[in-house]
Image (cartoon, grey):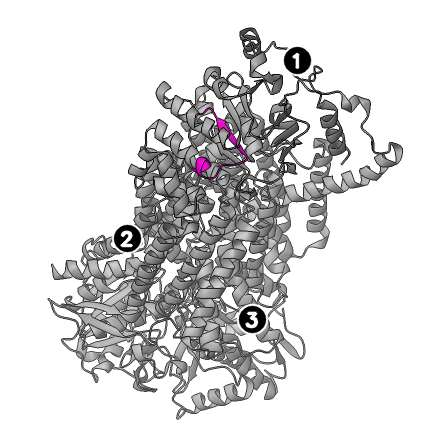
Amino acid sequence: MRPIRLVAAAATALAVIASAVGCSSDGTPQDGPTVAADTVKAGPPSGWSDGGYTVDAASLKCGQTAANPTRGVTDNEITIGGLAYLTSASGSSMAGTELGAQARFDRANAEGGVNGRKINYVGTLDDGNDPARNSAQAKALVDKNIFAAVPVMTSSANYLDTFCGETVPFFGWGFNLGFCETSIGFGVTGCQFPEGDVTSTTYGLMIQAMFGGDASGKTTALVGVDNDSARAGLKQLGEQIRSVGVKTVYEENPIPVAGITDTTAVVNALMTSNNGAPPDVVLYVADFNSVIKMTAAMTAAGYEGKNLNPVGYDPRLAGFKDLQKSYTIVQWQPGVDTSVPAIKQLTEDFAKYAPDQAISLPAMAGYWAADMFVQAATKAGRDLTVDKLLKVLNSDYSYYVEGAVPETRWPLNHNISSPCASIVQLNGDKYDITSKLSCGSLIKK
Amino acid sequence: MTEFFNLVVAGLVTGALYAILASGLTLTYQTSGVFNFGQGGVAFSTAYLFFQLNTGQGLPVVPSAILCVGVFAPALGWLLHRILFNPLRDASIAARMVATLGLLIALPALCLWISAMLREKASLDLPTVEDVFRFPGLGPSPKEIYKLGNGLILDSDKLAILGAAIFSALLLWYLVRRTRIGLEMRASVSRPAIAALRGVDPDRASAVSWITSCGLAGLVGVLLAPMFGLANFTYNTLLFVSIPAVVLARFASIPIAMAGGLLLGVAQNLVDGYVDLDITGFPTAVPFIILFLLLFFFGAERGRSAGTTLEEKPPAEDPTEVSPWRRRALWGVVTAGLLAYTAWGATDFWAGLLAEGLATAIVLMSFTVVTGIGGMVSLAQVAFVLAGAFTTGILLSHDVPYLPALLAGVIVAALTGAVIALPTRRLGGLPLALSTLALAFIGQNLLFQIRDISNGSGGWAIPAPDLGIVDTANPRWMVVMLLVLLGLTIWLVHALRTSSTGRAMLAVRSSDVGAQTNGIAVGRMKLLVFVISAAIAGFGGVLLATTRGRVTNTDYDAFLGLVWLATTITFSIRRPAGAVLAGLVAALAPQAFENIPDSTHFMQILFGLGAIGLARDPDGALAAIGRATQQRRRRQAGPATAATAPAPAAPSPAVAVPVGGDVPTAAGALAGAVEPVLRVRGLHAGYNDIEVLHGVDLVIGPGEALALLGSNGAGKTTLCAAIGGLVTPTSGTVELAGEDVTAIPAQHRRRDGIYLAPEGRGIFPDLTVEENLTIWLRDRDERDRAYEAFPSLARRRGQAAGALSGGEQQQLTLAPALVRPPRLLIADEPSLGLAPLVTEQIFAALGQLQQQGTALLIAEEKTRNALSVAGHAAFLTVGHITWAGPTSELDTEQLARAYLGTAGAGAGATPAAPATAATKAVRVAE
């Protein structure tokens, strides 16, 4: 399963995106907030600085009390269902996420359930990456009387109107708009589409990490996909990178939505983008096939800098020729590091409850989303209702899995993602962790 | 300069991909009239099978490739030809297009569904596409990358495509130029009727072209997988991107299509390299902009001759024969049922789905207007839906009340329709459909990417309005409101169809030129149809967005437009009921089939079945159901009739009275003792519903020559064509040397039987003289004898036959018959348009043939020449033989009477009528 091969999702899954509208004319904007480069340092995955940015829970959408607060809850059961694109015409898929959630719920049930209630996981419905089907399947889930939706992993946010209307809390990977500015959506790393006056230093820090912590004077080129949301996403990544003092010398969206057919023009432009020379880093935010085509072509053209992308991590990609030496940015700690207790637990859960499932990013996202729900529901106590759960989550709640999933704080992360990531490099048959999960800070614009 | 060179070379290599796809599209369009959107589906299926064999089962590349590209894809092509496209040859362009769209949707789904079922039910260990990162191709895996010269980078995947393109070009060249079947293909493309007369079976040519083009598509499919992965979406997009090359070739020339494909690759690269437009969606939209511009310049001319507006048959009468009141009652019952279900049976969930289905039905009603009434295939309806819904959404966000916002949405949609129609309406048929498709893609990738219009990926909220009396936030009230609005829309469409405007539209649809001469402003009429349809689509679009609560720019993409059209046509494009059913199915079916494994793909397979259904019944499922009901009713009625009145076993006297009363029958004097070469009895024939021949009897003995005389319009050509097998008689028989050949079409008749030299030269103008002769004379010796007979042809054997003089063309027509004398030669107006001297030569040749024992039937308006050869003559007057006899008994007075249509029975008439009548009676009894 190639995670997020669909362009829109790929472009946004790891990006922090703001609402800023407008086009850069020459592709090398140098505006945006900056902080003194030497003050930006990578920190631990919890306790990151919010830069003074706060979110008032009352300002969020869907903050009403539930019409049926005990929907899906009986004395001994909690009904849960998920929504994801398990198939799609573009071949991209979140398949694996349903088994990831299943593994976590099965362990919870084996340990006696959530405050004595077993989780009745009715499965994850497939929206086929079709917006119309997305809203229909959301209605179908409500029709199945679910208490909460776990995991939610779709490109389209059409489910939101239904979940909001029925007050259905949902947990997943926040790469669609439904996770943003709503009090009922909880992304394991927060909302990836911030609207408003906030950004972060995440990508800048990751590029620093690729240079051993000091990237001063380095240059980066950003290559994205040709649609509106990918464009906005790329612009934000540019801001993040510039915020640590790295220059962005190329920021364009030349890759057609169906994937790139010929790389010549883009490679030409990249190889001369840094005043006639190639840049130090090229970041490709695109679908998997376009990323490997670009990476391979750049390597063939004699590019000796670093290739960075958000889609190249999957245990089954080990040894993949066209991605050798390239870096991948991941929003949590990859599954290869079993020295972390939580990752070890995850690996064991997969081995026990979903033995055939590779520990891919969608599978991990499903697992962590389920974990986040189980923890919050446990904290809400025996008299579980929708309102109680949401009240617990939205009153200074913090979710953090040590060394595995970065801290998210609620309600803050309803509006922005946590400023954290890790970086891996594919070296032969194995991924080396270039930078362990670490965090920068939010920056108020 | 280096950069330019690199871009051009790399572009050429990429273009090879489009070149193969475009050549396959052109080939099948030429030989079967079908523009195969389904090629992407064929490519995907072949690649998928290859993936399963190679990656899944570990079969090496070469045997896998042979199985997939050499066996599977061609076999699929043959199958599609048999069950889908051959039956659809004469169907409307919309039906043909939808059959291929069905393929595009269903084929990949079928592959995925079958493997999902095998995995689940048979526990087979098949890899899924999602589990694999590198797909196999024909080249090395992983690919080799080569750096050439100064920065030119090519890889083995691309070189494999280039190699495949060269292979395809050679294969097609050899097939079309060097083989018998290629010659036959070109002959049947050049002049289908003549080709049939010369024994060329158009089915065979079409089958071979399907086999070839599917084989090529399969080859491309396998080569694409390592480059783009196995994604249906990508395969289809690449196919759409290659369409400009087909348009450049004017849908006709394979070499130009290939060159066009290469150029397209270069153009794309040059735009990427040098055009720095900072507009979102521009790089994605470039191929579609090129497509639109090409259609704008090249589409019109072709569209007028090949478009629906000229070729489509008039709408079939309603096959159900249900009275309007019964139908209204049916509507009433269904509506009441739906209301009752909504009120008491449905959960909120199902009521909401029902509302969505009804809103979709209103959108689909726009197809009933533009395609069903207007005869134009529009694939841009999704653009109108988005235009309407976005307008409403924007206004609602500015606190404009719902009704004015809805109205504004409808108006903007209508205006968008006008903008799209203005440049495209002069196109017909396929070019119109393709240009609307291009505009839909341009809208999706450029216009609706603009943030001010789409409000980013979140879109605009369109909450259900509180109408005062009812609050449609309750899905039940929404259903009621939509039922009312749907009823209004149906009424509007109905009123439109029966209004004078509607009739004018139908006139435009049947014949553009005809309508024009009748004073109908064709352009304005088409514009009006388009605008009304766009307004309905916008109206439905706003309502659909309302039922969903939101509209975003990914909700209605161009591909959905294709799916919608396919669904509507599968039911019925001409009747509002078709749109209503299609709308309900589109919304409800995915939920209804939810429990079937891999239901998403299962749904898509249904489209394929729909397409096959369409091949059987191009008017759609409703018409098929209607026809079935009718047949059942007739079957039920049949036995009852038989019980009361036994079938007339013997010819009753009433039936035996011959048409015309005077028993005008032509018969050669020699008939009787010797078996005649040709015996025609009671022949009725015509075109569509117009009967031209009203019972013709004719006998020609061996070696006899009969002059068939008659004025212009008497039916001479029809008679010749009916005897020759080009026109199927409605009743009566044609016997050739005692064998009944009535039902055998020309291409399947024995080659030594009848040779028809049709009116206006029986040659293939695009083929050379040599090739013209080769069609009938397969041996070189035979052709040499033809050149001996007409030495002037020998000198021009390499020239296109169309470049010959009129006399030479007539010589070329008759030459094969001289070399292989048939039993009967029919010459239809052989002297037409020829100088007297040339005419003499031609008739000398005919005389020579007669001496060799060939019987002649010479149809002539001018009598003198024919009578110089013929021993007998027959007069044909408005579909009847009015006089027949030896030319010696013919006098000028009879001639004049024959031409004036007042001639009575001739002296030489033989009463062959009773036999004819008996035959007829038997046929009636059957």
* Picture quadrant where residue B643 is located: top right
Q: Is residue B387 visible?
A: no
| Quadrant of image for the N terminus of chain B | bottom left
Disc 1 or 2, which lies upstream in sequence?
A: 2
Q: Position of residue B378 (x, y in %)?
A: 45, 41
Q: Tell whether A314 sits left or right of B511.
A: left
Q: Is residue A227 magenta?
A: no
* Picture quadrant where residue B296 is located: top left
Q: Which residue is mark 3?
A: B116
Chain part drawn in magenta: B816-830
User: What is the distance, in whole Å, between disc 1 and disc 3 at their CAs?
Assistant: 76 Å
User: What is the distance, in whole Å, between disc 2 and disc 3 at their CAs?
Assistant: 37 Å
Labels 1, 3: front one: 1
Chain containing the residue with disc 1 = B
Which amino acid lies under the numbered mark 3 shown in the image of this protein? Ala
Local packing at callout 1 (Cα closer than 10 Å; few below 14, some 14-19, many 20+) is: some
Which amino acid lies under the numbered mark 2 shown in the image of this protein? Leu
- Asked which secondary structure carries label 2, the reply is helix
Labels 2, 3: front one: 2
Question: Are discs 1 and 3 less than 8 Å apart at CB?
Answer: no
Q: Which residue is mark 1?
A: B905
User: Which of the numbered marks, if any, corresponds to residue B264?
Assistant: 2
- Asked which secondary structure carries label 1, the reply is loop
Which amino acid lies under the numbered mark 1 shown in the image of this protein? Ala
Q: Against B638, is A212 above or below?
A: below
| Quadrant of image for the C terminus of chain B | top right
* Picture quadrant where residue B234 is located: bottom left
- Pick the residue in front: B266 or A45: B266
